[in-house]
Amino acid sequence: MVIMNKRARSSPKKTRSRPNLPHDGALEAERTRAILASVSEAIITTDAEGRITRFNQVAQKLTGFTRTQAEGAFFSEVITVIDEASGAPIENPLKQILRSKESIRFEKHAAMISPSGRRFAIEAVAAPMFSPKRSIAGIVFVFRETGAGADSSGKRPMRENRDELTGLFNRNKFKERLEELTADAAGHDRRHALLYLDLDKFKIINDTCGHVAGDQLLKRVGAVIKGKVRQTDLVARLGGDEFGILLVHCPLPKANEIAGTICEAVRRFHFAWKDSPFTVGVSIGVVAIMPSSDNPETILSAADGSCYLAKEKGGNRVHLHSEDDRELSQRHGEMQYISRITNAFEHDLFRLFYQPIVALGKNKEKKRIWYEILIRMMEDGGRVVGPMNFLPAAERYDMMPAIDRWVFTAFFKFYKKNLEGRLPPEGFLCDINVSGMTLNDDSFLTFIRDLFAAYNVAPQTICIEITETAAIANLDQALRFITELKALGCKFSLDDFGSGLSSFKYLKHLPVDYLKIDGSFVKNIVENTVDAAIVETINDIGHLMGIMTVAEFVENRAIVEKLEKIGVDFAQGYCIARPRPLDESLRDVPNPSYTAAE
C-alpha cells in the first residue's frame, strides 16, 4: 500500500493530454481478459443466474470446453464438482453462495470430470461478486489441478479405499459413504438407494476352474456392473462374490429399474475359461435410503435380506424391500433362532431322531435295517422344534459345521452304548447328513477319522448323505471327502437329486452309492406324468451307472406301488414311518418296522 503525504494530496493536478485509448468499458474488458489469460489457475465467472460470463484459457484446457461453448451456458451444465472418493456430486457453488453469501473453499477430496471422461483432483475457491446494492451479482470460481499424488489418469491413489482385486471401492468406503447418504437423506429430505448384489453360480466356477478363474470372473463382472451406473454412484466389492451399489439422488422405482438392467447385463455376460464357457447370474436386493430410514446398519441388513430372498427364489432376479415385507420378516425370524441354537448347544437341547428307509419290490436287501439320522431341537415345555425352523438360520449364519459335528458325535456315542455287538446279520446302515459348509471345512475329515477310532464304529455301517447342490458347489472338496471316506468303507448318498440343473453332468464325477430322488418329484408321480417320467429317468440312469435309488416323500400306498412299477430300490416317507426319537430305534433292532410298504 502506498501512503501519500498531505502535500501531495493537496497539490493541484496537472493537466495532461490523454492518448487515443478505447473507451473505459472496452478498456476494462481488455484488462480483465488479459488478467484471466495470464494467471496459472482456471477462472470462471458467472452472472446472478449462473450463466458463465468469463472462461479463461486454463479453464478451457482443464475442462475440455472451449470459451465459445462455455460462455453463456449455465455453470452447472459445464462444471460438476464431485467428491473425489465416492464420485457423488458436490452442491453447485452458486447455490451455496446464494444461501451463505460467503466464499467457499474446496481444499480436499474434490474432483472434476472432463467431457472425455478424465477425472482429476482439484483445489478450488468460489467467491461472491456483489452489486452496488450488495446483492449477489454472480460468482468467481477459481480452481487448479492438484498435481501431487496424481497419476497419469489424474486420479489420486487411494488404495486404502479400494478392493485390490477389482479396483472397485471396498467395504469400508462403502459403509462410510452409506453413513453420509443416510445423514444426507435425513437432513435434506432426499432419496437415495442401496443395491446389494450376490453372484449366482460363482462357487461352481471357482471350485471347478480354480481361484484364478474366479478372480478373473469377479474383475470382469465388477466392470459390467460399474458400466450400468452413473459416475456419481458408488460401486464396491463387499467381500467374496458380493457387491454393493449406492445410487445418489435416486428414487426407489428408478433404483429398481437400474437393478433390473444390471441383472440382465450379468445374465448376458459370458465368461470363458480354457475354452469352457460359463454364464452367471446375480441376485439383487434393493432398499430406499429415505429421511425416515433408521440407520446405515438397518438399511444394509434389509438390503442383504432382500438379496437373500432373491437368491432363494431362484436367483438372477431383484427383490424390492418394503416395510411390510412378509418374506423378509420370515428371515428376521430365522435370525432370532441363532440365539436359540446357541442356547441349545449350551444346555444340551438337541435330540437325535431317526426315520427308516426300506427296500421295495424284490430288492435283495429287503431285510437290511437302514435309518436316516435327523436332528431336532427341544424348547421349554418339551416342544420339539423341527429342522426346517432352525436349520435355514444355521446355514445362513455359518453354524452348520458345529451342528454336523454334534450329530456325528452324539450318534457315535449312541452306537457305542446301544448298538455295538447287537447289529443284525442281514446288515445295518445309518445315513448322517453333512452340509455343504462342512464339506469346505478341511479339518472335518480328520474329525470323522478320529471318531471312528474313538468309538470303534464300523465305517461300513455309516452312509454319509450330502445334497446334490452342496456337492456341485464344492465339487473338488466333495470328491476328496467321498474318496477318502469310501476308502475306509463308508457309503455315500446324494440327496435331493434332480433339484439342480446340471444333475447328470456332475453325477459321473461323484462316486456315490445311492441317489435320493428329490421328493418334489416323488410326491406327485401318481397324478403328474411329467414328474413320473423324471423319476423314471433318474432311476434308469442311476442303475446304468451302478447306483441304487431311494425315493423321498413317499406319503401313501399309491406312490409305493408306482415306485415299485418303475423299479426304484428304496423308499422313505410318512407312508413307511414317521421320524421318532433315536432311543426308540432299539425296538427295531433286529426287527425293522416297514409293514406299510409290504
Image (spheres, helix red, strand yellow):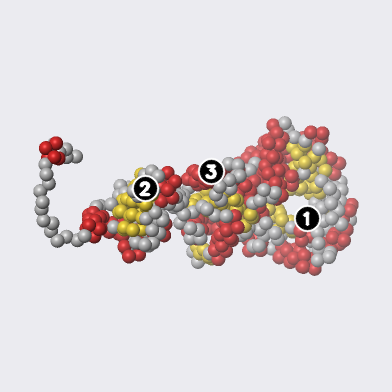
| Figure check: 130 above or below 21 | above
Badge 3 amino acid: Gly
Residue matched to label 1: 552
* Residue ID at (28%, 52%): 41
- The picture quadrant where one finds residue 17 is bottom left
| Figure check: 58 above or below 132 | below
State left or right for residue 191 relative to residue 157.
right
SS of the residue under disc 3: helix
- Looking at marks 1 and 2 on the same chain, the residue that comes earlier in the sequence is marked by 2
Is residue 550 or residue 284 the one in the foreground?
284
Residue matched to label 2: 133
| Figure check: 516 above or below 589 | below
Residue matched to label 3: 187
* Residue ID at (66%, 62%): 501
- Quadrant showing the C terminus: bottom right
- Quadrant showing the N terminus: top left
Contact check, label 1 and label 3, Cβ < 8 Å:
no
Badge 2 amino acid: Lys
State left or right for residue 35 relative to residue 246.
left
* Residue ID at (48%, 58%): 230
- Looking at marks 2 and 3 on the same chain, the residue that comes earlier in the sequence is marked by 2
SS of the residue under disc 1: loop
Picture coordinates of residue 155, whole percent (x, y): 36, 52
Nearer the observer: mark 1 or 2; the answer is 2
User: Does any portion of residue 349 appear in the rendered image?
Assistant: yes
